[in-house]
Amino acid sequence: MSKHSHSLSDAPWRARLMSAAAMALLLTACASNKVQTQKMHDAAAYNVQLGLAYMNQGDLERAKDKLDRALTQDPESADVHSARAALYARLGNKDKADAEYRAALRIAPGDPRMVNNYAVYLCQNGRTDEGVKRFLEAARNAMYTTPEAAYTNAGVCLRAANRDEEARTNFMRALQLKPNFAEAQFQLATLQFDHGEYAGARAGIDGFIGTYNATADLLLLGVRVARAQGDRVAAQRYARKLQLDFPGTDQARALAALGSG
């Protein structure tokens, strides 16, 4: 009897041991899958970096090879699809580029980087209304840490479509959000200069560089504005600061090309 009852009393313990062993196997498998998934994700991210580097070097064939590989490693990565979109745009395949940007947005609809990337593409391809809509979407996204850049990009997009008054509004929005955002001030002053609004452009440039760090772009534009106003002293002052603070830059070379007129 003792032998029989002993085996019966052991049964629940054996079942528990088997259950624990099965659970351990399940946990091990889950952990293993998680590690494998992370490895594939990391490999895809690395291939995206390589693909973008090759793209920047103009080696589009190698770029495509790396980005194709990244897609097989992590097909649900928004970064992979966004990089492939940029490649197809370079290759002139608009349909595939558009499809890849949309795939990135499907995977990461709340990621303002993806929205911004697609907006740039749309503007570059003359789809101004769609592009501006996307930029403004990014600007209003609470996750987007640089809405001033999105407003400025919207303005640049509108200027390319000769919609300067709408562009002006967006540059001003950017400066209201971040008064020390030099690119927005440069774009606004350039627009004013192009419209012959020299006093406004000059006031914007002087106000900015009197409060924040000057940029080479603003100083070169300052030279052009001051010359248009016939203010040679101010033009020389901007030019001297550009030569001293930004020697060897494209703007310093452009200044030399302007001559002393």
Image (tube, helix red, strand yellow):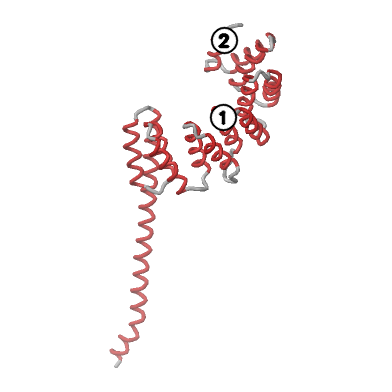
Residue 189 vs residue 110: left or right? right
* Nearer-the-camera pick, 159 or 258: 159
In x, y percent, where is residue 81? 41, 42
Element under label 2? Answer: helix
The one nearer the camera, 245 or 195, is 195
Q: What is the secondary structure assignment of the residue under circle 1? A: helix
Q: Which residue is under mark 1?
A: 156
Disc 1 residue type?
A: Val
For residue 56, side relative to residue 171 (left or right): left
Q: Which residue is mark 2?
A: 258
Upstream in sequence: badge 2 or badge 1? 1
Tell me the crowding category of disc 2: few under 14, some 14 to 19, or many 20 or more residues within 10 angstroms, Cα based: few
| Image disc number at residue 84 | none
Q: Comparing marks 2 and 1, which lies closer to the viewer?
A: 1
2 and 1 marks in contact (CB < 8 Å): no
Point out the image quarter for the N terminus. Answer: bottom left
